[in-house]
Amino acid sequence: QVQLQESGPGLVKPSETLSLTCTVSGDSVTSGSFYWSWIRQPPGKGLEYIGYLSYSGSTNYNPSLRSRVAMSIDASKNQFSLRLSSLTAADTAIYYCASLTQDLWFPDWGQGTLVTVSS
Amino acid sequence: QSVLTQPPSVSGTPGQTVTISCSGGFSNIGGNLVNWYQQFPGTAPKLLIYRYNQRPSGVPDRFSGSKSVTSASLAISGLQSEDEADYYCASWDDTLRGEVFGGGTKLTVL
C-alpha cells in the first residue's frame, strides 16, 4: 500500500498561484506502477478530478482547469506537485493527492489539505 | 452539474439492502470501468469497489457493484450503522478525456 501526504499553504490570495506537494512512501514515483493524481473537493460538495501525470512526464488535465494547471515530479524527493494559477474563491477546496492505476481507479489517497483563497 | 448522476441521498434501516444508482452515458460508463468510493465526514475518500464489482482487501462482501449499459449500481446488504457515509461513483470519460465523478450520495442509516 502506498502512503501519500499533501503539504502546502492553507491560505492563498486571489490571482496568486497555488503550489502543493505530495510526498509518496511505499513506492517510487518513477516505478511506473501508478500514475500520480490530484483531486479536490470544495467544502460540503463533491469530488472534482484535477489531473494526473506519469513517471515519464506525460500529463492529463481536467479540460475545465487545463489552462491553469501544471503538474511535475521530483524523483529525488519521491514527490509530485501541483501548480494552479489565477486563483479565485471558487478554488477553495480540500486538495487530495492519490495514486491512480493503469486501469484508472484511485487505490490510495492522502489525507487532504484545505486551501482557502481569500485576501 | 456532474457528468455522472447519483441520487443526493438514500436511507435504510439496519439489516436492509439499499442501492445507489449512477447514471452516465456511452462516453463514460458505457465504455469504461466504474469504481466506487466511500467517504466518512472529515476523512479522505476510500476505494470501495473497482472494475464494476471487485472489492479491495478488507471491504466486506456486503458491498457489491454492477453495471448495465450506461448505468451502474452499488448495493449494500445487511446495512449497518457504520455504513453511514457519502458514496461516489467514478468513470473515465472519453469525450472529456478525464476522470468524472458522480455528485455523491449520502447514506443515512435510520
Image (cartoon, grey):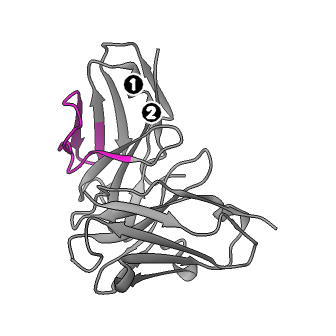
Please indicate whether residue A16 sits to the left or right of residue A36 in the image: right
Q: Which chain carries label 1?
A: B
Identify the magenta region.
Answer: B46-73
Depicted A23 relative to depicted B71: above or below? below
Q: What residue type is labelled 1?
A: Glu
Q: Nearer the viewer, mark 1 or mark 2?
A: 1
Residue B107 x, y percent position in the rendering: 45, 28
Mark 1–mark 2 Cα distance, whole angstroms, equals 8 Å
Q: Please state, as top left, top right, bottom left or bottom right, where the C terminus of chain A lies in the image.
A: bottom right
Please indicate whether residue B50 sits to the left or right of residue A110 in the image: left
Residue at mark 2 = B85
Kindly identify the residue that appears in the image at 38 percent across and 56 percent down: A109
- Crowd rating for badge 2 (residues with CA inside 10 Å; few <14, some 14–19, many 20+): some
Q: Do tag 1 and tag 2 residues touch (Cβ < 8 Å)?
A: no
Depicted A95 relative to depicted B17: above or below? below
Kindly identify the residue that appears in the image at 36 percent across and 68 percent down: A24
Q: Please state, as top left, top right, bottom left or bottom right, where the N terminus of chain A lies in the image.
A: bottom left
Residue B5 x, y percent position in the rendering: 44, 45
Q: Is residue B74 magenta?
A: no
Depicted A18 relative to depicted A3: above or below? below
